[in-house]
Amino acid sequence: MLRFLNVVAILALIGSGFYAYSIKYQTMLRAEQISKMTREAKSERDGIAVLRAEWAFLTRPERVQDLADKYLDLKPLAVTQIATAQSLPEKPERIDSIGRKLDALGLGGAATTPAASGAPTTPKGKPR
């Protein structure tokens, strides 16, 4: 019986050693993956920084102005081209076209949206 317990203890020791080494190598693999992903993230951040710098370079006002002068053939803005807020037309009332079609079919409902009619609504969109 003592030999059997010794053999079981040795097998348990060997098994725990293999388990410990497998955990160690899995940890090393995960650490390498984390390191690789960190490098990739830094590379992407650097690429984004380069693209932002390039965008800032390309959208400089003096460069855009030169390109507009060269390619667009724009004329200077006249004072008569500027409109005031009062001269703009009023915003049309919002109309629920589906509701109107339902009314025409006799299936009922308001012809305007609850927001346009000023009625308070519940979270499901039904009038209170």
Image (cartoon, grey):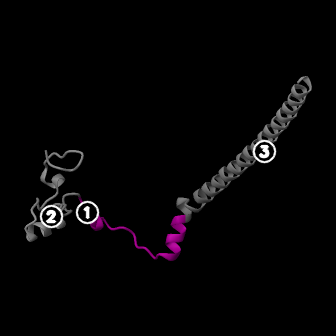
In front: mark 3 or mark 2? 3
Q: Quadrant of the N terminus?
A: top right
Q: Which residues are magenta?
A: 64-84
Relative to residue 38, is residue 22 drawn left or right?
Answer: right
Q: Nearer the viewer, residue 26 or 39?
A: 26
State the residue at coordinates (17%, 57%). 113
Q: Nearer the viewer, residue 103 or 76?
A: 103
Q: Label 2: how many residues lie within 10 Å, few (<14), some (14-19) or many (20+)?
A: some
State the residue at coordinates (67%, 55%). 47
Which circle marks residue 29 in the picture? 3
Q: Label 1: how many residues lie within 10 Å, few (<14), some (14-19) or many (20+)?
A: few
Which circle marks residue 99 in the picture? 2
> Type of residue at label 2?
Gly
Q: Nearer the viewer, residue 34 or 90?
A: 34
State the residue at coordinates (21%, 62%). 88
**Residue indicated by mark 1:** 83
Q: Label 3: how many residues lie within 10 Å, few (<14), some (14-19) or many (20+)?
A: few
> Type of residue at label 3?
Leu
Q: Quadrant of residue 98?
A: bottom left
Q: How far apart, in angstroms, are the residues tagged by discs 2 and 1?
A: 36 Å
Q: Earlier in the sequence, mark 3 or mark 2?
A: 3
Q: In this picture, is 108 found above or below 3?
A: below
Q: Is residue 68 magenta?
A: yes
Q: Earlier in the sequence, mark 2 or mark 1?
A: 1
| Circle 3 SS class | helix
Q: Is residue 33 magenta?
A: no
Q: Earlier in the sequence, mark 1 or mark 3?
A: 3
Q: Nearer the viewer, residue 63 or 104?
A: 104
Relative to residue 4, is residue 77 drawn left or right?
Answer: left
In front: mark 1 or mark 3? 3
| Circle 1 SS class | loop
In front: mark 2 or mark 1? 2
